[in-house]
Amino acid sequence: KVMLKKWAWSGLTRGGGASSVRGMWRGITSGAATPLISRECAGQTVTFHETLPHWIGGRKVFAEKGARTLEKRYPATGEVLCRVPVAGEATIDDAVATAHEAFKEWSALSGAERGRILGKAASFLHEAHPELARLEVLDTGKPLQEAEADMSGSDALHFYAGHASTTCVSGSHIPLGPAGFGYTRREPWGVCAGIGAWNYPNQIALFKSSPALACGNGFVFKPSEFTPMSVIKIAEILSDAGLPDGLFNVVHGDGSTGALLTTHSGVRKVSLTGSVATGKRIMAAAASTLKAVTLELGGKSPMVVFPDANIENAVRGAMMANFYTMGEVCSNGTRLLVHNDIIEEFIRQLCEKTSRIQPGDPMNPATNFGALISKEHQEKVRAHIAKAKAEGCNVLFDASETVP
């Protein structure tokens, strides 16, 4: 629900001043554009900048010379693909102010008008999916076959485009007897912020922004610093489809950038996908300004197999739960509990199917097990395996040392 009082625009920034928002965002400065890099990926060329830009006000905004940047490495090889700028206070202020200016235009449209534009954007995303999938592989190291099969992000935008003129704007009527009636109405918050995780960068960017945009809000998204490449392409596609300049903005950075978004007075809601520890920090920081918060956090997901189960189906489910996206999913089957009556046959089928996994180059269409997100994460996983062995684990199948 949007605040009904008029905000002093100087209160939307940390620097104060009497500039109007429109004047502020039109005056956003950008450093020099860095060279474009072209890379052949499974039969298609993708391009990205040597140092990635932010996306603010409907255009690329490059960091000033000397600004802090981070390395973006390809998980499959450790190769540095590009550099990622770290947005500071001024960049966050610009992005939030820009989003609020665009929000005024966007929220004035009818739900049906918003839905038509979002539906067009979803169709554009479907058409661009081969390129987005390859950028996701460069970002995450997941197999190309997985990235190409996952169109859930654009599907979500299609879904919410349909709700823009119904659920997103509908209220309720409350009879109060002869004296009258009450009613509720849905109103947009204003500017919402999304902070993404590194396992599903395309999906998460669109899962967070689609309902916010359908309901009439402006949006600022910070992808993980590990997976920053594809979201700029998504921003360009949304702009090409007719979203107002500044409605969807992208700011890069690390945890410090996320903290600036969470505490910004112009942000009315924050949505995070991440760890429990990060969720606690986001909730505590948001409480200082009474922001609404949505958290999707990691957890434990045991899988229980009873003796009357179809063993083959259960084994397939266990494979999916533990090996899809290299196990880097929030629904990973962290514990597998199988009834004693079927344990031997279950283990036999599980080992047989596990032996067929094809690890390798993520861009190879035959690969079905790609790279973990980083060398540090790989070492952490191997440390857990070593600890289990040291504690007496009965190893039935082990290919951990043969996988590069």
Image (tube, rainbow, N blue to C red):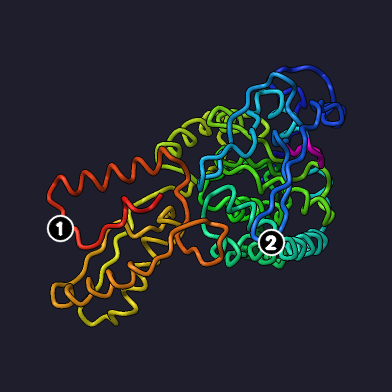
Image coordinates for residue 6, horizontal then vertical, percent:
77, 32
- Within 10 Å of the Cα at label 1, are there few (<14), some (14-19), or many (20+) other Cα atoms? few
Image coordinates for residue 122, horizontal then vertical, percent:
73, 62
Q: How many marks?
A: 2
The stretch of residues the image draws in magenta is 54-60
Q: Which of marks 1 and 2 is in front?
A: 2
Q: Label 2, on which residue?
A: 43
Question: Three-letter amino acid code at disc 1?
Answer: Asn
Q: Looking at the image, which residue is at 60% across and 32% down?
A: 253
Q: Does the magenta stretch include residue 295?
A: no
Residue 361 is marked as none
Image coordinates for residue 222, horizontal then vertical, percent:
62, 39
Quadrant hosting residue 117: bottom right
- Within 10 Å of the Cα at label 2, are there few (<14), some (14-19), or many (20+) other Cα atoms? few
Circle 1 SS class: loop
Quadrant hosting residue 32: top right
Question: Three-letter amino acid code at disc 2?
Answer: Gly
The reply to whether residue 170 is visible in this rendering is: no
Viewer-side residue, 388 vs 117: 388
Residue 394 is marked as 1
Magenta stretch: helix, strand or loop mostly: strand
Q: Looking at the image, which residue is at 58% across and 53% down?
A: 137
Labels 1 and 2: the sequence-earlier one: 2
Circle 2 SS class: loop
